[in-house]
Image (spheres, rainbow, N blue to C red):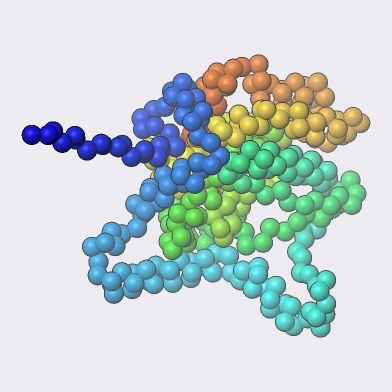
Amino acid sequence: MKAVPAPEVRETPMVQSAVPTGEPTAARLHQLLKQVTPDQWKSLDGTVEKSASKDEPDLQELDGKTMRAEARKRKEEAARTRHRIWGELWREKVERVRAASPYSRYSSWRLSAVMVKGGDDLRQELLASQIIEQFSAIFQEAGLPLWLKATKVLVTSSTNGFLEFIPDSISVDAMKKLFPGKTLAEIFKVAFADRMFEAKKNFIESSAAYSLVVYFLQVKDRHNGNLMLLTSGHVVHIDFGFMLSNSPGGNMAFENSPFKLTQEILDVMDGECSEQYEYFRTLLIRGFLEARKHMERIVLQVRMMLVGSKMPCFREGADFVLSTLQDRFFCNLTEEACIEKVVELIDTSVNNWRTIQYDNYQRLVNGIL
Protein backbone atom coordinates (compact mmCIF):
# COMPACT_ATOMS: atom_id res chain seq x y z
CA MET A 1 0.00 0.00 0.00
CA LYS A 2 1.48 3.32 -1.05
CA ALA A 3 2.14 5.74 1.83
CA VAL A 4 0.44 9.11 1.60
CA PRO A 5 2.73 11.97 2.60
CA ALA A 6 1.54 14.11 5.49
CA PRO A 7 0.23 17.56 4.49
CA GLU A 8 2.74 20.35 4.81
CA VAL A 9 2.07 22.60 7.78
CA ARG A 10 2.92 26.25 7.29
CA GLU A 11 3.18 28.63 10.21
CA THR A 12 1.41 31.93 9.80
CA PRO A 13 3.73 34.81 10.63
CA MET A 14 2.51 36.83 13.59
CA VAL A 15 2.62 40.59 13.81
CA GLN A 16 4.82 41.51 16.73
CA SER A 17 3.58 43.81 19.43
CA ALA A 18 5.22 47.23 19.79
CA VAL A 19 7.19 46.02 22.82
CA PRO A 20 7.30 42.51 24.33
CA THR A 21 5.18 41.89 27.39
CA GLY A 22 6.79 42.27 30.77
CA GLU A 23 9.37 44.85 31.80
CA PRO A 24 11.56 45.38 28.70
CA THR A 25 15.30 45.60 29.19
CA ALA A 26 17.49 47.80 27.02
CA ALA A 27 18.77 44.76 25.14
CA ARG A 28 15.23 43.54 24.37
CA LEU A 29 14.15 47.02 23.26
CA HIS A 30 17.26 47.29 21.12
CA GLN A 31 16.46 43.98 19.44
CA LEU A 32 12.85 45.03 18.86
CA LEU A 33 13.71 48.44 17.45
CA LYS A 34 16.07 46.80 14.96
CA GLN A 35 13.16 44.71 13.68
CA VAL A 36 10.65 47.53 13.30
CA THR A 37 10.77 49.42 10.00
CA PRO A 38 8.75 52.51 8.99
CA ASP A 39 6.57 50.28 6.76
CA GLN A 40 5.43 48.34 9.82
CA TRP A 41 4.00 51.24 11.81
CA LYS A 42 0.49 50.50 10.53
CA SER A 43 0.85 47.02 11.99
CA LEU A 44 2.00 48.44 15.28
CA ASP A 45 -1.05 50.69 15.41
CA GLY A 46 -3.06 47.52 15.95
CA THR A 47 -1.70 47.35 19.49
CA VAL A 48 -3.35 50.69 20.21
CA GLU A 49 -6.57 49.62 18.50
CA LYS A 50 -6.68 46.40 20.49
CA SER A 51 -6.31 48.22 23.79
CA ALA A 52 -8.67 51.04 22.81
CA SER A 53 -11.37 48.52 21.97
CA LYS A 54 -11.42 47.46 25.62
CA ASP A 55 -13.18 50.73 26.41
CA GLU A 56 -16.17 49.76 24.27
CA PRO A 57 -18.93 47.26 25.07
CA ASP A 58 -18.90 43.77 23.60
CA LEU A 59 -21.18 44.52 20.65
CA GLN A 60 -21.03 40.96 19.34
CA GLU A 61 -23.46 39.89 22.06
CA LEU A 62 -26.02 42.50 21.03
CA ASP A 63 -28.45 42.16 18.18
CA GLY A 64 -28.14 44.44 15.16
CA LYS A 65 -30.81 46.92 16.20
CA THR A 66 -29.46 47.40 19.72
CA MET A 67 -25.93 47.67 18.37
CA ARG A 68 -26.90 50.52 16.03
CA ALA A 69 -28.82 52.28 18.79
CA GLU A 70 -25.85 52.06 21.17
CA ALA A 71 -23.44 53.34 18.50
CA ARG A 72 -25.77 56.22 17.62
CA LYS A 73 -26.20 57.18 21.28
CA ARG A 74 -22.45 57.06 21.88
CA LYS A 75 -21.79 59.21 18.79
CA GLU A 76 -24.39 61.82 19.78
CA GLU A 77 -23.05 62.05 23.32
CA ALA A 78 -19.50 62.45 22.02
CA ALA A 79 -20.61 65.18 19.59
CA ARG A 80 -22.38 67.09 22.38
CA THR A 81 -19.33 66.81 24.63
CA ARG A 82 -16.97 68.01 21.91
CA HIS A 83 -19.23 70.98 21.16
CA ARG A 84 -19.30 71.87 24.83
CA ILE A 85 -15.49 71.75 24.98
CA TRP A 86 -14.44 73.29 21.66
CA GLY A 87 -17.60 75.08 20.55
CA GLU A 88 -17.93 75.95 16.88
CA LEU A 89 -15.28 74.24 14.77
CA TRP A 90 -12.89 76.44 12.83
CA ARG A 91 -13.98 75.12 9.40
CA GLU A 92 -17.61 75.89 10.29
CA LYS A 93 -16.65 79.39 11.38
CA VAL A 94 -14.74 79.96 8.14
CA GLU A 95 -17.77 78.90 6.09
CA ARG A 96 -20.10 81.12 8.13
CA VAL A 97 -17.89 84.21 7.85
CA ARG A 98 -17.25 83.64 4.16
CA ALA A 99 -20.97 83.36 3.44
CA ALA A 100 -21.48 86.81 4.98
CA SER A 101 -18.38 88.40 3.43
CA PRO A 102 -18.82 90.71 0.39
CA TYR A 103 -15.36 89.61 -0.80
CA SER A 104 -15.97 85.85 -0.72
CA ARG A 105 -16.08 85.66 -4.53
CA TYR A 106 -12.34 86.35 -4.72
CA SER A 107 -10.10 83.27 -4.91
CA SER A 108 -7.59 84.93 -2.57
CA TRP A 109 -10.15 85.17 0.25
CA ARG A 110 -8.78 83.78 3.52
CA LEU A 111 -9.74 83.88 7.17
CA SER A 112 -6.83 83.83 9.61
CA ALA A 113 -6.60 84.19 13.37
CA VAL A 114 -3.62 85.59 15.27
CA MET A 115 -2.81 86.45 18.86
CA VAL A 116 -1.31 89.87 19.54
CA LYS A 117 1.15 89.81 22.41
CA GLY A 118 2.60 92.91 24.05
CA GLY A 119 5.15 93.43 26.77
CA ASP A 120 6.96 90.21 25.93
CA ASP A 121 9.96 89.31 23.77
CA LEU A 122 8.78 86.74 21.22
CA ARG A 123 12.21 86.01 19.76
CA GLN A 124 12.53 83.04 22.09
CA GLU A 125 9.15 81.74 20.94
CA LEU A 126 10.36 82.10 17.35
CA LEU A 127 13.50 80.09 18.13
CA ALA A 128 11.43 77.32 19.74
CA SER A 129 9.08 77.25 16.74
CA GLN A 130 12.01 76.92 14.31
CA ILE A 131 13.54 74.06 16.32
CA ILE A 132 10.19 72.26 16.56
CA GLU A 133 9.84 72.59 12.79
CA GLN A 134 13.28 71.00 12.41
CA PHE A 135 12.36 68.10 14.71
CA SER A 136 9.15 67.57 12.73
CA ALA A 137 11.11 67.41 9.46
CA ILE A 138 13.55 64.87 10.94
CA PHE A 139 10.71 62.59 12.09
CA GLN A 140 8.89 62.85 8.76
CA GLU A 141 12.05 62.04 6.79
CA ALA A 142 12.50 58.91 8.92
CA GLY A 143 8.87 57.84 8.39
CA LEU A 144 8.10 58.00 12.12
CA PRO A 145 4.50 58.83 13.13
CA LEU A 146 5.59 61.50 15.62
CA TRP A 147 3.38 64.60 15.37
CA LEU A 148 4.39 68.20 16.15
CA LYS A 149 2.75 71.56 15.52
CA ALA A 150 5.15 74.41 14.75
CA THR A 151 3.17 77.61 15.27
CA LYS A 152 4.12 80.66 13.23
CA VAL A 153 5.60 83.65 15.07
CA LEU A 154 6.07 87.20 13.76
CA VAL A 155 8.32 89.41 15.87
CA THR A 156 7.60 93.12 15.37
CA SER A 157 9.80 94.53 18.16
CA SER A 158 11.64 93.49 21.29
CA THR A 159 8.40 93.73 23.27
CA ASN A 160 5.64 92.92 20.76
CA GLY A 161 4.65 90.40 18.13
CA PHE A 162 2.05 88.08 16.66
CA LEU A 163 1.46 84.40 17.41
CA GLU A 164 -0.46 81.98 15.22
CA PHE A 165 -3.76 81.02 16.80
CA ILE A 166 -4.25 77.26 17.14
CA PRO A 167 -7.82 76.54 15.98
CA ASP A 168 -10.01 73.86 17.57
CA SER A 169 -7.88 73.77 20.71
CA ILE A 170 -8.39 74.16 24.45
CA SER A 171 -6.00 73.96 27.36
CA VAL A 172 -6.20 70.88 29.56
CA ASP A 173 -6.79 73.24 32.50
CA ALA A 174 -9.81 74.91 30.85
CA MET A 175 -11.24 71.56 29.77
CA LYS A 176 -11.04 70.11 33.28
CA LYS A 177 -12.77 73.20 34.67
CA LEU A 178 -15.73 72.50 32.37
CA PHE A 179 -16.15 69.10 34.05
CA PRO A 180 -15.42 69.53 37.77
CA GLY A 181 -14.33 66.36 39.49
CA LYS A 182 -13.60 64.54 36.21
CA THR A 183 -10.14 63.38 35.23
CA LEU A 184 -8.55 63.98 31.84
CA ALA A 185 -8.96 60.29 30.95
CA GLU A 186 -12.67 60.33 31.85
CA ILE A 187 -13.32 63.43 29.74
CA PHE A 188 -11.26 62.00 26.89
CA LYS A 189 -13.23 58.75 26.97
CA VAL A 190 -16.59 60.54 26.60
CA ALA A 191 -15.48 63.19 24.10
CA PHE A 192 -13.95 60.65 21.72
CA ALA A 193 -16.24 57.68 22.37
CA ASP A 194 -17.10 57.42 18.67
CA ARG A 195 -13.47 57.48 17.47
CA MET A 196 -11.42 56.29 20.41
CA PHE A 197 -8.71 54.50 18.43
CA GLU A 198 -7.90 57.51 16.25
CA ALA A 199 -7.93 59.96 19.18
CA LYS A 200 -5.71 57.81 21.42
CA LYS A 201 -3.31 57.19 18.56
CA ASN A 202 -3.03 60.96 17.96
CA PHE A 203 -2.62 61.62 21.68
CA ILE A 204 0.19 59.06 22.04
CA GLU A 205 2.09 60.10 18.92
CA SER A 206 1.98 63.82 19.77
CA SER A 207 2.79 63.22 23.45
CA ALA A 208 5.88 61.18 22.52
CA ALA A 209 7.05 63.84 20.04
CA TYR A 210 6.64 66.74 22.48
CA SER A 211 8.29 64.74 25.26
CA LEU A 212 11.42 64.63 23.10
CA VAL A 213 11.24 68.37 22.38
CA VAL A 214 10.74 69.18 26.07
CA TYR A 215 13.72 67.01 27.03
CA PHE A 216 16.19 68.26 24.41
CA LEU A 217 15.28 71.94 24.89
CA GLN A 218 14.75 71.58 28.66
CA VAL A 219 11.38 73.34 28.43
CA LYS A 220 9.98 74.27 31.85
CA ASP A 221 6.70 75.61 33.26
CA ARG A 222 4.79 72.56 31.90
CA HIS A 223 1.52 73.03 33.78
CA ASN A 224 -1.88 72.17 32.29
CA GLY A 225 -2.44 75.74 31.16
CA ASN A 226 0.39 75.28 28.65
CA LEU A 227 -0.87 71.96 27.27
CA MET A 228 -3.46 72.28 24.50
CA LEU A 229 -5.74 69.45 23.35
CA LEU A 230 -7.11 69.52 19.80
CA THR A 231 -10.39 68.06 18.55
CA SER A 232 -8.31 65.36 16.84
CA GLY A 233 -6.84 64.21 20.17
CA HIS A 234 -3.39 65.69 19.48
CA VAL A 235 -1.51 67.47 22.27
CA VAL A 236 0.28 70.77 21.59
CA HIS A 237 2.72 72.48 23.97
CA ILE A 238 2.72 76.28 24.04
CA ASP A 239 4.68 79.01 25.86
CA PHE A 240 8.42 78.47 25.55
CA GLY A 241 9.50 81.32 27.82
CA PHE A 242 11.60 78.93 29.92
CA MET A 243 13.99 76.62 28.12
CA LEU A 244 17.67 75.66 27.65
CA SER A 245 19.12 77.45 30.70
CA ASN A 246 16.39 79.47 32.43
CA SER A 247 13.45 78.35 34.57
CA PRO A 248 10.62 79.85 36.67
CA GLY A 249 11.17 81.23 40.17
CA GLY A 250 14.38 83.10 39.46
CA ASN A 251 15.99 80.13 37.75
CA MET A 252 15.56 77.84 40.76
CA ALA A 253 15.27 74.77 38.45
CA PHE A 254 12.56 73.06 40.49
CA GLU A 255 11.30 71.06 37.50
CA ASN A 256 14.10 68.58 36.91
CA SER A 257 12.08 65.80 35.26
CA PRO A 258 13.13 65.06 31.65
CA PHE A 259 9.53 65.65 30.54
CA LYS A 260 5.99 65.62 31.92
CA LEU A 261 4.48 62.15 32.29
CA THR A 262 2.01 62.28 35.17
CA GLN A 263 -0.67 59.77 36.06
CA GLU A 264 -3.44 61.65 34.23
CA ILE A 265 -1.45 61.35 31.00
CA LEU A 266 -0.75 57.68 31.66
CA ASP A 267 -4.44 57.05 32.33
CA VAL A 268 -5.33 58.22 28.82
CA MET A 269 -2.97 55.47 27.61
CA ASP A 270 -4.66 52.95 29.96
CA GLY A 271 -1.76 52.93 32.44
CA GLU A 272 1.81 51.67 32.53
CA CYS A 273 0.87 48.04 31.90
CA SER A 274 -0.98 48.70 28.65
CA GLU A 275 0.21 48.07 25.11
CA GLN A 276 -0.59 51.70 24.34
CA TYR A 277 2.04 52.81 26.85
CA GLU A 278 4.55 50.44 25.28
CA TYR A 279 3.72 51.97 21.90
CA PHE A 280 4.43 55.39 23.43
CA ARG A 281 7.79 54.19 24.75
CA THR A 282 8.77 52.61 21.45
CA LEU A 283 7.92 55.80 19.56
CA LEU A 284 9.90 57.90 22.02
CA ILE A 285 12.98 55.66 21.72
CA ARG A 286 12.78 55.54 17.93
CA GLY A 287 12.42 59.33 17.81
CA PHE A 288 15.39 59.82 20.13
CA LEU A 289 17.65 57.57 18.05
CA GLU A 290 16.63 59.41 14.89
CA ALA A 291 17.10 62.87 16.42
CA ARG A 292 20.64 62.15 17.55
CA LYS A 293 21.61 61.24 13.98
CA HIS A 294 20.79 64.84 13.05
CA MET A 295 22.05 66.58 16.19
CA GLU A 296 23.86 69.30 14.22
CA ARG A 297 20.62 70.36 12.53
CA ILE A 298 19.17 71.14 15.97
CA VAL A 299 22.32 72.63 17.48
CA LEU A 300 22.81 74.91 14.47
CA GLN A 301 19.46 76.61 15.13
CA VAL A 302 20.67 77.53 18.63
CA ARG A 303 24.23 78.43 17.62
CA MET A 304 23.03 80.96 15.04
CA MET A 305 21.07 82.89 17.71
CA LEU A 306 23.76 82.91 20.41
CA VAL A 307 26.02 85.71 19.19
CA GLY A 308 25.00 89.00 20.76
CA SER A 309 21.64 87.66 21.92
CA LYS A 310 20.12 88.73 25.23
CA MET A 311 17.34 86.13 25.26
CA PRO A 312 16.65 84.72 28.76
CA CYS A 313 17.25 81.14 27.58
CA PHE A 314 20.96 82.02 27.06
CA ARG A 315 21.49 83.45 30.52
CA GLU A 316 24.13 80.82 31.46
CA GLY A 317 26.33 81.66 28.48
CA ALA A 318 27.01 80.20 25.03
CA ASP A 319 29.45 77.51 26.14
CA PHE A 320 27.09 76.12 28.78
CA VAL A 321 24.03 76.15 26.49
CA LEU A 322 25.79 74.42 23.59
CA SER A 323 27.69 71.83 25.66
CA THR A 324 24.65 70.77 27.71
CA LEU A 325 22.45 70.62 24.60
CA GLN A 326 24.94 68.36 22.82
CA ASP A 327 25.34 66.17 25.92
CA ARG A 328 21.62 65.45 25.97
CA PHE A 329 21.88 63.62 22.63
CA PHE A 330 24.19 60.93 24.12
CA CYS A 331 26.25 60.88 20.93
CA ASN A 332 29.25 59.38 22.79
CA LEU A 333 27.25 56.21 23.61
CA THR A 334 26.55 53.16 21.50
CA GLU A 335 23.00 52.71 20.26
CA GLU A 336 22.30 50.01 22.84
CA ALA A 337 23.67 52.14 25.68
CA CYS A 338 21.64 55.09 24.38
CA ILE A 339 18.44 53.02 24.54
CA GLU A 340 19.29 52.17 28.14
CA LYS A 341 19.60 55.88 28.92
CA VAL A 342 16.30 56.73 27.22
CA VAL A 343 14.54 54.01 29.23
CA GLU A 344 15.94 55.66 32.38
CA LEU A 345 14.63 59.06 31.23
CA ILE A 346 11.16 57.60 30.75
CA ASP A 347 11.18 55.85 34.12
CA THR A 348 12.41 59.04 35.83
CA SER A 349 9.59 61.05 34.27
CA VAL A 350 6.76 58.70 35.29
CA ASN A 351 4.95 60.43 38.17
CA ASN A 352 8.06 62.43 38.99
CA TRP A 353 7.70 63.92 42.48
CA ARG A 354 8.82 67.40 41.46
CA THR A 355 6.43 67.47 38.48
CA ILE A 356 3.53 66.52 40.76
CA GLN A 357 4.48 69.19 43.32
CA TYR A 358 4.80 71.85 40.61
CA ASP A 359 1.28 70.98 39.41
CA ASN A 360 0.07 71.23 43.02
CA TYR A 361 1.73 74.65 43.35
CA GLN A 362 0.04 75.90 40.17
CA ARG A 363 -3.31 74.56 41.39
CA LEU A 364 -3.06 76.22 44.81
CA VAL A 365 -1.53 79.55 43.74
CA ASN A 366 -2.90 80.11 40.22
CA GLY A 367 -5.93 77.82 40.19
CA ILE A 368 -4.59 75.74 37.28
CA LEU A 369 -6.06 72.24 37.40
Given residues 191 and 241, the one toward you in this image is: 191
Q: Is residue 221 left or right of residue 276?
A: right
Q: Is residue 68 visible?
A: yes
Given residues 202 and 158, the one toward you in this image is: 202
Provide residue 178's location: percent of width, then percent of height: 52, 62
Give the residue at x 55% y 45%. 205
Provide residue 300's location: percent of width, then percent of height: 80, 31
Q: Is residue 358 visible?
A: no
Provide residue 256's location: percent of width, then percent of height: 60, 29
Number of marks in the rendered image = 0
Given residues 185 and 343, the one toward you in this image is: 343
Quarter containing the N terminus: top left
Seen in the picture, residue 165 relative to 32 is either above or below; the reply is: below
Provide residue 128's location: percent of width, then percent of height: 75, 41
Give the residue at x 83% y 71%. 108
Q: Is residue 203 left or right of residue 115?
A: left
- Spot the residue most to the left: 1
Q: Is residue 85 left or right of residue 28?
A: right
Dividing the picture into quarters, in which one does residue 96 lie? bottom right
Seen in the picture, residue 298 relative to 182 is either above or below; the reply is: above
Seen in the picture, residue 71 relative to 50 is either above or below; the reply is: below
Give the residue at x 34% y 58%. 56
Give the residue at x 80% y 80%. 105
